[in-house]
Amino acid sequence: MLWKGKEMNQNKADPALSTDLSREEQADKRIEKNEKGGLWNNKLLWTVISILIAGISIWAVVSQQKEVSFRLLAAQLMQANPGWLLASVVSMLGFIVSEAWAVRIICRSFGYHPGMHNTCAYSATDIYFSAITPSATGGQPACALLMMKDGISGTVATVALLLNLTMYTFSILLIGFVCFVFRPQLFFEFGPVARVMIVMGYTAQILFSVFLFLLVKNERLLQKICRAALRIPAKLHLIRHVEEKQEKLDQIMREYRRCSEMLAGSGVLLFKVFLLNFMQRVSQISVTMFVSAALGIGGLSMLDVWILQGYVVLGSNYVPVPGGMGVVDYLMLDAFDACMTAQQAVNLELVSRSVSFYCCILLCGAAMLWYYGYQRRKKKKASQ
């Protein structure tokens, strides 16, 4: 109290200093507000672009098959098995919940205890923004901001999301291995271009997984990348107070090192996170398998449909298009056209893609908005 009183007296005795500080604080607030406005304007722009890409993708799917009829699609949906359709929806929900569960386990290992509704909001935010930005670049930053608003330190949020992304990538590699070992012949159901995309996608995932592993294990590499990210905009005079930001970065890296050391001795934790990420990928791919069973499409076993969809994931995951829109559609039709009628291929593609991607994104967007409103109401109630 004596120290606070002394500080207050000093500020009162020096009104010029107080005025300068208030002006600087106001300027910082204006800058922060403009940055947030620019961030949300950027996300809004990508949302609009993603809607346009989605519309073009659906139009391309339908227009390339002249004999396709929406009337037959509607009739087949009316006759679809409701149990298998429900299974596809549950599988889509599993895609969201698996990531939420993984992030919750990681946060709890560092002493944070977010509820499942919190981590489901983090997962929904990650999935939504990953789907509307090229190469999923917007998902993790948006998720990290939400985590920090809930009181989770930036370092823990970074480590948690980076570890989750690493295990997510490893799970794709395992799925690719399963596909090539159990059904190598289905790889040749794809055309030459699609086969090249699948091989390139799998190779890119291997390289990316090695890079992510190095980031998790070696904080010096991450620190060099972050320092370069600070130097470049500083030289262009786009950021201020570079020295302060550099000191803060060094402090974060020290905390990051401690977090990494904690994770290094937690084999059980790493296995759990990997298993949940593997379940997440399995859930997403299984949507197509369940839709195929619901529509009664013959000619392929459920396992064959799952394997083909696994190859599609490998081929589309590295292409820098929001949500893989257009690319996934092309690869699915390229494979399924060779195994079933054109009408069946389009029906399977449109319905499964609607459940696994479009409905998932709408649900994630709604959950994200609900959580944002929930946090605002909670903050307003606490301030009263």
Image (spheres, grey):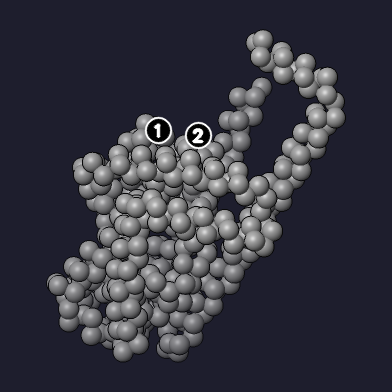
**Disc assigned to residue 151:** 2
Residue located at (59% from left, 62% from top): 232
Q: Where does the N terminus fall, quadrant-wise? A: top right
Residue located at (40% from left, 62% from top): 355
Q: Residue furthest top?
A: 2
The answer to whether marks 1 and 2 mark residues whose Cβ atoms lie closer than 8 Å is: yes
Q: Mark 1 vs mark 2: which is more N-terminal?
A: 1
Residue where numbered disc 1 is placed:
112
Q: Is residue 80 left or right of residue 127?
A: left
Q: Is residue 280 left or right of residue 320?
A: left
Type of amino acid under label 1: Tyr
- Say which element carries label 2: loop
Task: Say which of 175 and 159 sits in front.
Answer: 159
**Residue 131 percent coordinates (x, y):** 48, 62
Q: Is residue 383 visible?
A: yes
Type of amino acid under label 2: Gly
Residue located at (67% from left, 10% from top): 2
- Counting other residues with Cα less than 10 Å from the Cα at mark 2, is it few (<14), some (14-19), or many (20 or more)? few
